[in-house]
Image (cartoon, helix red, strand yellow):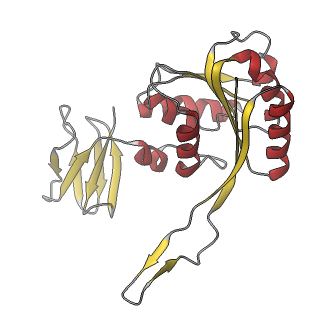
Amino acid sequence: MSYLFIHDGKDREYLLAPGETLETDLGVLDVPDDVTPGDTVETHLDEPFAVRELRGPDLFNHLERTGAPMMPRDIGLVVGTTGVQSGDRVLDAGTGTGVLATYLARMGATVTTYEKDADFADIARENTVLAGVEDTVTVQTGDVTDDLDTLDQAAFDVITLDTGDAATVVEHAPDLLVPGGFVAVYSPFVEQAREALTTAREVGLGDAETLETIQREMDISDRGSRPSTRGVGHTGYLTFARKP
């Protein structure tokens, strides 16, 4: 289990495990084997580091990431719309390096996730260990569409997809989901979102909708407050549907 070691708020922040040693300009930090969240550990130069347990946003910042993972705001929309909860079984495809899978597993779900890229899959497995969910996330190297006929029928509470061929899986969603189960598709392009939505309707899934995720930071100063002009905050499209 790793913890965050923080000096002066978030100005200096490191991810370390008990027994590790960190060498910085603030001194050498030897992490005790019995360190626990809430402790304060000092370097040999008497510089203090507060110890904090990892939470979701911390994992997003410190997990090894490649490509373009879903952002926390996208993950929050998936969680809020599908109601994923402890005890749920999730089928995930397009693991990447496991950001979404680890978030869902830390909520108590059991996740089976597929990743075509073997290097990404290896990183995802390492990230599950860092997140402490290696026992509840199974990372399969391969294409989920190859296993659609062999996956347990009516076994999954939620299906989450971040793949170019997501519509193919959506087509099988009525057979894979429990009654009332959800499918959520993340798409970087609106054409993929349209295909997923159209397929969901064609196979009889209900409550089908596509949402664009946009988030704008507020600039607040003595002069006044207004939305930030830095970018539009767009990340992608999320398509949701539910088995009756």
Quarter of the picture holding the C terminus:
top right
Name the residue at the bottom extreme.
Answer: 223
On screen, residue 174 versus residue 96, left or right, reads right
- Between residue 19 and residue 14, name the one nearer to us: 14
Vertical relation: 135 (above or below) 50: above
Name the spot of residue 146 as percent of width and height, x first.
81, 18
* Quadrant hosting residue 172: top right
On screen, residue 72 versus residue 49, left or right, reads right
- Between residue 73 and residue 177, name the one nearer to us: 177
On screen, residue 207 versus residue 82, left or right, reads right
Instruction: Name the residue at 61% across, 64% down.
Output: 233
Name the spot of residue 119 as percent of width and height, x first.
66, 34
Instruction: Name the residue at 17% across, 59% down.
Output: 47
* Quadrant hosting residue 164: top right
Name the spot of residue 224 as percent of width and height, x first.
42, 86
Quarter of the picture holding the N terminus:
top left
- Total tally of numbered discs in the picture: 0
- Between residue 67 and residue 147, name the one nearer to us: 147
Whether residue 160 is visible, yes or no, is no
Instruction: Name the residue at 75% across, 20% down.
Output: 174
